[in-house]
Image: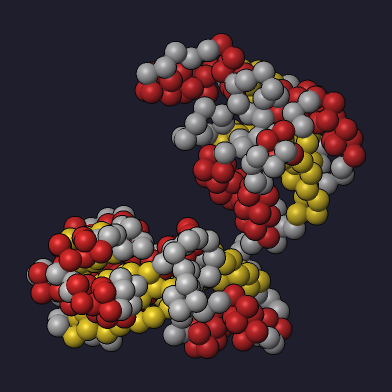
Amino acid sequence: MRTAVITVGKEVLTGKTVNTNLATISRMLNQIGIDTNRSFVIDDQKEEYYKILDFIDEELIIFTGGLGPTIDDISRETVIDYFGVDASINQEVLKGINEYFDQIGLKMDDTNNKQAYFPKKSVILHNDLGTAPGVIFSKGEKTIILFPGPPHELLPMLKESIEYLKKKLKIRLYSKGFRMVGIGESVMEKALIGFYELHPNVNIAPYASVGEIKYVFTSNKIIDLESAMNQFKKKFEEYIYGDLNDTLESIIVESLTKKKLIISVVESCTGGLLAGSITSVNGSSRVFAESIVTYSNEAKVKYLGVSLNTLNTHGAVSIECAYEMVDNLYNKTISDVCVSVTGIAGPTGGTKEKPVGLVFFGINYKGNTKTYKRIFNGNREMIRKRATIYALNLVRKELNQL
């Protein structure tokens, strides 16, 4: 099925908004064997819709954006008008939009009524995160899907649409995968030379993010899928921490819970990101004791008893300071596992001897302390994120050894 994705909005054309929806849509379609052949970005003017629809000939046409209540949100009515399908206000959807406004304590304007305008023969994609439902309808051999622009609203509808397309096209696919940490995408791709060719019936797609990589395996033959995944796991088991539904922090909380261990952390450059990651997991209260953010030298001395001699001689960003931070935290808490992080996130503060991105870590398990040094690249946000992921992975690997 040939596909065109059309993004609507001047904010995308002017660069004020990055078009992440295209990547998300194309990736998820590819997982069920549908390629995106063309993509376009258009202004929210009726003639632009008509020009592009006159031009393209794809069987699947996807629009994102322009489903809001304002005067320039014209995707729904314009596309329906172009294809000439019967449409009307859906009273059930209109009632739901009214209830949404009542829930948030705002008066609904009449302009919101158009958000309940749908082809009579269509699949309504309900929006639990906003007021703009999406829709799927057909005209002849063409399938048209309209999504709202905000990515967090689009994603649940996209997943629903994927299931619709799988049924319509009678696609039976199996999809599983791994989450990995501690290895870069370029290193992985070099190590995978020849691997893809060994599994021609399996689509293997990498999706890299800051500090992590996700590999998704998709096939219509479960035996081929399992064979590819088993060989992949054997080759890269050191870096695989879970399946597609796992996160590093959820794996850690699960492991701590099983082993009946308590963890505490002390952070400097990550400013609470490490503690926030762990406590974001449901059930973390059973294994997480406490967290201290000692951003200044004075705080390191006041709350952890880091010696002035260490700070004056080696500095706050040093292996010695990371050691004292985690060692003293262990002595002050009831925790079985303690972690420390101290570094330079930048963009200022670096020197030739201690560049931006330099981070030291300490991990103490029941009195035994280990320290680690890393230099991360990227901007301030990326360095802090990479340091957080590295610290989490240190905990994961330590727990695996127990």
Specify whether residue 306 is in view. yes
Location of residue 242 by image quarter: bottom left
**What residue is rendered at 60% in x and 82% in y?**
187
Coordinates of residue 1 in the picture (x, y in percent): 78, 53
Coordinates of residue 268 in the picture (x, y in percent): 31, 63
Specify whether residue 160 is in view. no
**What residue is rendered at 15% in x and 62% in y?**
302
**What residue is rendered at 83% in x and 30% in y?**
48
**What residue is rendered at 59% in x and 80% in y?**
188
- Residue 307 is left or right of residue 187, and the answer is left
In this orientation, which residue lies closer to the viewer: 14 or 41? 14
Looking at the rendered structure, the number of numbered marks drawn on it comes to: 0
Coordinates of residue 182 in the picture (x, y in percent): 47, 78
Q: Would you place residue 3 above or below residue 127 in this image?
A: below
Coordinates of residue 358 in the picture (x, y in percent): 43, 73
Quadrant of the drawing holding the C terminus:
bottom left
Q: Would you place residue 79 above or below residue 250 in this image?
A: above
Q: Would you place residue 336 above or below residue 52 in this image?
A: below
In this orientation, which residue lies closer to the viewer: 187 or 250? 187
Q: Would you place residue 375 above or below residue 66 in this image?
A: below
